[in-house]
Image (cartoon, helix red, strand yellow):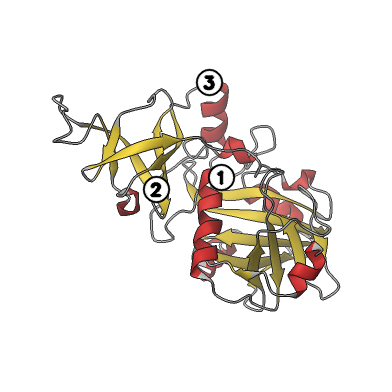
């Protein structure tokens, strides 16, 4: 059975936590280039990449996929953030720019664990029904993300598997209610090629560039497994109390997102292989996979 036939027969399911926004107008590219942390101007029409918006102090407000449809049209696939609040904040910086920001409530995200029919890497494709197809997987583990007017069915097990894939490949899924506190380097967003240190100014650019060029990145993402990761508590160095540990536990990192019994923590780059624990339960380090950079 071809991938196209599988798609038509409903293997796709709803992906929670993704909202679509549009930026349209003569100044859409210039506005996005000035506000967002990756190089929008370097994208050709029909390409996408990971991008984000930072506070002036270089803390991530929101992470998203950014699609360049034309010289006057961008789509943002906003991850785990309040879309209306995001647009309201961004609108304050429009001033006289000819750009319109809009939450696309008519568009929905669906996913499937199948290879894309036409999309590949950073190149997205438009299907005959008008939906957009993105390559959201790796060579070893294909996935397709579809943005269209038809929402896929809810499937809790498949949605959890999708989220686990994201975390395993270093794509953090942050709590929409959390205050911005992490820099792109602390979230290891270089793994996704999600920010630029070479393009012109943008909010937080000075912090990002200084950290990069002075080699001051001391923390990054670590993937951990354990029964307590969902509590998003501190990661402690050493074995849990009662496991033979005699040294005083000390906080060494912070769990920031989880899917089932796996999660991502911001930890020192030299933390080693443990032992670690959180909320009284042991944590085991797992490898982070490549393949989601665009």
Tell me where residue 6 appears, x and y as whole percent.
75, 68
User: Is disc 1 placed on a helix, strand or loop?
Assistant: loop
Q: In the image, what residue occupies the spot 47% across and 44% down?
A: 59
Return the residue at label 1. 203
Tell me which label, 1 or 2, sits earlier in the chain.
1
Mark 1 or mark 2, which is nearer to you? 2
> Is 251 rendered above or below residue 173?
above
| Pointer 3 local density, CA inside 10 Å: few below 14, some 14–19, many at least 20 | few
Q: Which residue has dot 3 on it?
A: 214
Structural distance between the alpha carbons of marks 1 and 2: 23 Å
Q: Earlier in the sequence, mark 3 or mark 2?
A: 3
Is any atom of residue 95 visible in this view?
no
* Residue drawn at x 79%, y 56% as measured from the top left: 124
Mark 3 touches mark 2? (CB < 8 Å): no
Quadrant where the N terminus sits is bottom right
211, 9: nearer the viewer: 9
Query: Which label lies toward us, 3 or 2?
Result: 2
Q: Where 173 falls versus 290 (above or below)?
A: below
Find residue 17 and name its label.
Answer: none
Where's residue 42, x and y in %?
78, 43
Say which residue appears at 17% left-offset and 27% top-offset. 245
Toward the right, the furthest residue is: 128
Instruction: Tell me the element at label 2.
Output: strand
Mark 2, residue position: 256
Q: Residue 227, how many percent across, how many down?
A: 31, 49
Which mark is first along the chain, 1 or 3?
1
């Amino acid at each position: 059975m071809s991938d196209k036939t599988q798609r038509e027969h409903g293997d796709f399911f709803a992906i929670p936590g993704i909202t679509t926004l549009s930026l349209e107008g003569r100044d859409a590219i210039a506005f996005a280039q000035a506000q967002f942390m990756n190089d929008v101007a370097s994208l050709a029409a029909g390409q996408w990449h990971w991008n984000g918006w930072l506070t002036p102090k270089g803390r991530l407000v929101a992470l998203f996929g950014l699609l360049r449809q034309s010289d006057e049209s961008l789509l943002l696939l906003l991850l785990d953030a309040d879309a209306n609040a995001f647009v309201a904040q961004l609108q304050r910086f429009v001033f006289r720019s000819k750009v319109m920001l809009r939450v696309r409530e008519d568009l929905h995200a669906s996913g499937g664990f199948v290879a894309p029919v036409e999309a590949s890497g950073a190149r997205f494709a438009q299907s005959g029904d008008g939906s957009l197809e993105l390559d959201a997987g790796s060579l070893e583990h294909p996935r397709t993300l579809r943005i269209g007017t038809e929402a896929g069915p809810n499937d809790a097990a498949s949605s959890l598997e999708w989220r686990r894939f994201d975390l395993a490949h270093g794509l953090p899924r942050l709590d929409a209610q959390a205050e911005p506190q992490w820099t792109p380097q602390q979230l290891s967003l270089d793994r996704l090629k999600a920010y630029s240190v070479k393009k012109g100014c943008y909010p937080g650019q000075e912090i990002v560039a200084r950290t990069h060029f002075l080699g001051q990145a001391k923390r990054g993402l670590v993937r951990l497994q354990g029964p307590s990761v969902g509590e998003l508590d501190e990661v402690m160095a050493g074995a849990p109390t009662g496991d033979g540990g005699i040294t005083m536990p000390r906080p060494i990192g912070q769990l920031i997102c989880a899917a089932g019994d796996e999660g991502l923590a911001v930890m020192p780059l030299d933390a080693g292989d443990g032992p670690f624990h959180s909320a009284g339960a042991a944590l085991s380090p797992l490898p982070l996979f490549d393949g989601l950079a665009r």
